[in-house]
Amino acid sequence: MKRTCALVVMAAMICSNCAARGPAHRVDGPPVNDAARHAASFAAEPAGNGAAARQDSNVWRQYSARLPIGSTVRVRTTDGEHLTAVLLTVDEAGITVKPRTRIPEPARQVPFDRLAQLELAGEGANIAKAAAVGGAVGAGVFLGLLMLLFANFD
């Protein structure tokens, strides 16, 4: 009976395949597909005339209108300023963001003609977290098999 229980527990540990499920799906806002997210993350070139600047502004306006309010975004302006912030509002003049800093800062209005890059942040995998989870799972399996081994000594 002990061996049967040990085999069932080992099979459950090995065949659970819980880590292969993939990332969790967001349900807190409208879906933004990867193509749309990366389409607007290109660096905008400085416009030589007013028509090109208006076209860039319209592209940023359309893209930012589809982003969920409250999401974390990475912003780069044409001045070279980089910031990670929370998207508060999107209006005709630009976007309003609240920078995520250690010391709280007031919200900033960034006009569309000053945007060089805008993309959702935090969607990538955290390698350190994945390594820690993998190490913890490996240690748990090792200790479980060690306990099963000691349980079979009569």
Image: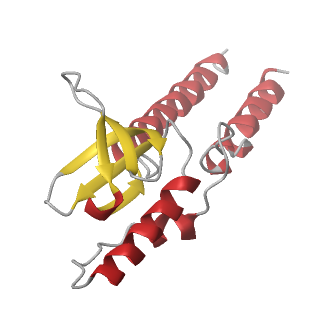
Residue at screen point 41% across, 57% down: 119
Image position of 73 (left or right of 2)? left
Image position of 138 (left or right of 84)? right
Residue at screen point 69% across, 39% down: 27
Looking at the image, can residue 57 be seen? yes
Q: Is residue 77 above or below residue 87?
A: below
Q: How many marks?
A: 0
Q: How is the image coloured?
A: secondary structure
In which quadrant is the N terminus drawn? top right
Residue 134 image offset from top left, x and y in percent: 46, 41
In which quadrant is the C terminus drawn? top right
Foreground of the two, 84 or 66 = 66
Res. 46 image quadrant = bottom left
Residue 93 image offset from top left, x and y in percent: 39, 52
Residue at screen point 67% across, 48% down: 30
Residue at screen point 34% across, 82% down: 52
